[in-house]
Amino acid sequence: MTRLFITEESNVILPIKRPLTNCLYVVGTLLFLSCSDDSSDSGTTPPASGGTDTSEANDITDIELTSSSGDCSDYVGTYTSSVTDVNNSVNFTGSLVIAVSGSKCTFTSNSIPNHDFHDGSASFATDVTEVDADFEITTNPTDASSVTQLTLEYDNAVYLNGAKLDLLAAACYGVGNEPLGQEKIGCGDGNVWRYDPMYTGNDFGTDTHNAHTQPDGTYHYHGSPMALFDNTDPTAASPVIGFAADGYPIFGPYIDDNGTIREVQSGYTLKTGARVSQTGEGAFPGGNYDGTYRDDWEWTDAGDLDECNGMTVNGVYGYYVTNAFPWVMACYKGTLDASFKKGR
């Protein structure tokens, strides 16, 4: 029988597949177990004062998060997972260490997620490989004087399973010769009519977690990671699932609206009618606005969220996963950390 050990403070649900005794403690918002079973005399040694338990990694394979803490230091720990590239039948071990030093949290990962991947009708251009990644998150994010737009120069965020969010594709109308699944490398930041990888009419070869690989084999998301929160029958607001490059937390899509759990609504609206030519467009695709391109959308303040796809709840500003454009975030409210710059 599988047993679940859960506390109000924990942000993970860990399946325990055998009877355990002497489960002793919880540290911060992460669930740490010090247990022994019928075949062992003792469990692991707890961290002395809430730091990272380096004696044994915590298995987060297929966990669903529950914590709403927007403080990255509350997630300090050493984590591992055992997952499979489904279509290639290859096994991987995910590795993530979250630590805190001064005013920064560090995320050190091998970019392997905590769930199976490359499933369904996914068609990855390159095979997934372990890619070392290091990100730094400020423990005290603040708004900049103005918002910063997304660019190809920076990764957008790191999720709490160690894999990154990279929303933009290097694919624009009339740029590159490869099919969309290859991301048409060559479309820079100055181009308009950029394809949206999340639009159902575009084929970016993503798996059921809205993710695929970059040319170097890095697994990355273009939208909701799906597996990190309850998608089926949520009875509470969605948890924090990661942190953006400016330090603000990212929440799942469900909010508590005066006792009613519902999906948060983006403030972006699909434009209507025929597309209008834009400055700097290169080639013009014509046709009607239908969501194929990011420029098919405009922020109209029609939903719950601001122009960056965020809002403040209980005094904490954060970005929210939405099931419509811009999917996670559309700009940054704070100042980007240089550790998210690609190729540094």
Image (cartoon, helix red, strand yellow):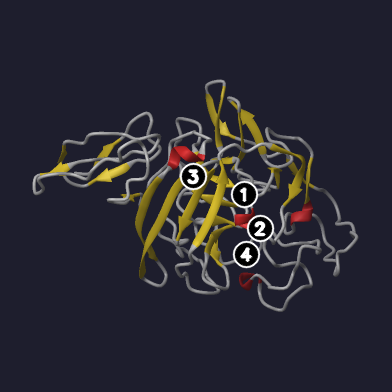
* Comparing labels 4 and 2, the label whose residue is closer to the camera: 4
Question: To which quarter of the image does residue 319 belong?
Answer: top right
Could you tell which of marks 3 and 4 lies nearer the N-terminus? 3
Does residue 155 appear anywhere in the picture?
Answer: no
Q: Find residue 66 and report its horizontal and vertical position in percent.
A: 43, 36
Could you tell which of marks 2 and 3 lies nearer the N-terminus? 3
Q: Find residue 224 and report its horizontal and vertical position in percent.
A: 55, 49
Question: To which quarter of the image does residue 315 belong?
Answer: top right
Q: Between residues 141 and 205, which one lies in front from this camera angle? A: 141
Mark 1 and mark 2: span between their CA atoms?
Answer: 8 Å
Mark 1 and mark 3: span between their CA atoms?
Answer: 17 Å
Q: Residue furthest bottom?
A: 177
Q: Find residue 174 and report its horizontal and vertical position in percent.
A: 79, 72
* Crowding at mark 3 (Cα within 10 Å: few <14, some 14-19, many 20+): few
Could you tell which of marks 4 and 2 lies nearer the N-terminus? 2
Report which residue position mark 2 lands on: 154
Mark 2 is on which residue type?
Answer: Tyr
Could you tell which of marks 1 and 3 lies nearer the N-terminus? 3
**CB under 8 Å between discs 3 and 4:** no
Report which residue position mark 4 lands on: 344
* Crowding at mark 4 (Cα within 10 Å: few <14, some 14-19, many 20+): few
> Is 236 left, or right, of 269 in this rendering?
left
Q: Residue at x 47, y 39 (%)?
A: 73
Q: Residue at x 70, y 47 (%)?
A: 330
Could you tell which of marks 1 and 2 lies nearer the N-terminus? 2
Give the numbered dot on residue 230. none
- Per the image, label 3 sits on a secondary structure element best described as strand
Q: Is residue 102 above or below residue 68?
A: below
Q: Find residue 197 and report its horizontal and vertical position in percent.
A: 64, 60
Report which residue position mark 1 lands on: 245
Q: Residue at x 68, y 35 (%)?
A: 305
* Comparing labels 1 and 4, the label whose residue is closer to the camera: 4
